[in-house]
Amino acid sequence: MARKSGTATDKRLAFEREALPHLDAIYTAALRLARNADDANDLAQETILRAYRFFDQFTPGSNCRAWMLTILYNNFRNSYRRGARERPADSADEFSGEIDANSLDADQSRINPEELLSSRMTGQRIELALAALPDEFREALILVDVQELNYQEVADVLGVPLGTVKSRVSRGRALMRRALCKLDRARGKTGT
Amino acid sequence: MDCREYISEYLAGHADGELAPLARRAGDEHVAGCPICRAQLIENRALKAMVRQSAGIVKAPADLKARIRTALDQADRANDAPWDTRLAAFAAMPRRIGERLRAPIVWAPAGIAAAIAIALMIAIGSVNHRRAAAIPPVPQFELAIARYHDFQREFVPNVPAEAYSDGDSTLYAWVMNRDPVRRVAADEAQTDAFDDIARSYRSANMPDDLFDLTQAGYEIAGGRVDRMADGRPVTYTLYTGRAGQIVSLCFSDPTMAAPLHAVNWLGMRSFYEYKGYSICLSFYPTGHFISILISRMPVTQLMRDIAAADLSGISR
Ligand SMILES: [Zn+2]
């Protein structure tokens, strides 16, 4: 079409190059947040379309994945999040006191790193330990470890101060570690 | 710096490569001279790797990719089109009704508003249909729902049963406790209830692990051993807590496969939203036993409580 302007095509090409390679990452984050495939699909699609609409606002050279995750989290917070998903607001504080005391122990229950990487420590245990974390710790850890964002980017995505990210990551790992030690002790059981 | 300071202030940032040059040098120096913190640093990095590996990036479904390409094409076309066509394209985007509709604010004359409303109704209809069709009927889940309703009306524990006997082939011939729900938990120490019920299940050759939901604020209200219509033994356990009741069913079923469209998975457990109920399905490694937990609470609540139970060390 003669009417199709060069800039529109350029925008689409740039978007395909910069943004679309992060689709899997966006979908993964959407699945974590929405917790069911239908909502995750909708959330991911809305995020991509919104990113496309506002692609002019993306700073070339910055982390496009982080930028899109910010859109995703905002979208989720504004539209999807429901009361049922929230934990009581005091959960973070409750946990943090415990951890400070525990992570500094003489460490009877240290995890052996080789063991941690061995097949016995299956992904299942990691998933369980992650699931048991309060949301805000889990989100910070996932954004750092899975989405590979730096702390500042995580702060932007979550809309919290940098110091909050630091402490959530630090405490989140300490909690994970304790949960894994617990799992080590209570292993292989099913319940009825 | 001392170990306390290293662990609370440096460790995570060190493992994540987030320390500024000076701080990083200080951290390096500390771990060089401190085997305990060095081990913690290695462990932190191993943990990162494990999280990345097990909670890693999953592939977006092919149909999502296709939908997105179509929507981007539509957006491109709409950009070149007059504004009223643009609005129609927006309205035709797949979306569900609810809060999300208020996000983009568009001003539209009445005629177009009506067109949008119609387009939305079509979109919602198709979404609902997709959702309703998501899980085809699962007989085991239907059974769970029926029992859940029975037990809402009345739950009569028939265990613990000290003189328990299946000699006459009615597994619950000897009923010890005909009092209403909570009798077991109210009258005996929690540990006794667990032990007695587990022992009764064991003597019926049924799995004897119970969910320890006490951490999550539940009491074990009681257990039953019954037979299903086809003669298969089944155990029912009722848990009551602030968030409501959870009924657990356990029986042998070699034909059962995990239905598609689980809303989430936790290890061997899969979670479903099914006809207004939240369901947790687990498979035992042996004996073709399955366990179904069913509740009216939101599925996220059920997941969290079960995760807490799994972490607390389960049956005694
Ligand atoms: Zn040290």
Image (cartoon, coloured by chain):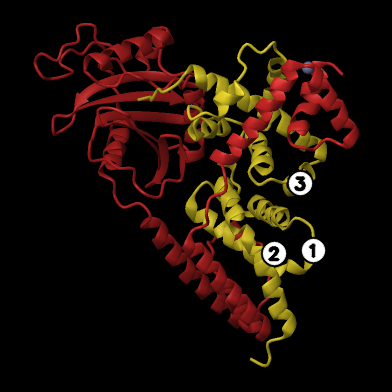
Extreme residue in the right direction: B22
Q: Tell me, by letter, which chain the rendering colours yellow.
A: A
User: Along the horizontal axis of the image, is A154 left or right of B84?
Assistant: right
State whether discs 3 and 2 lie on one chain: yes
Task: Name the chain letter of the residue that bears numbered label 2.
Answer: A
Q: Is residue B98 visible?
A: no
**Label 1: element kind:** loop
Picture coordinates of residue B163, whole percent (x, y): 19, 6
Closest to the observer, A52 or B119: A52
Q: Residue beneath label 2, please?
A: A18
- Asked if the residue under mark 1 is in contact with the one under mark 2, i.e. CB atoms within 8 Å, the reply is yes
Q: Residue beneath label 1, please?
A: A60
Closest to the observer, A185 or B220: A185
Q: Is residue A44 above or below residue A16?
A: above
Q: Is residue B293 above or below residue B157?
A: below
Tell me if mark 3 has few (under 14), some (14-19) or many (20+) residues whose alpha carbon lies within 10 angstroms of its own.
few
Q: Residue beneath label 3, please?
A: A159
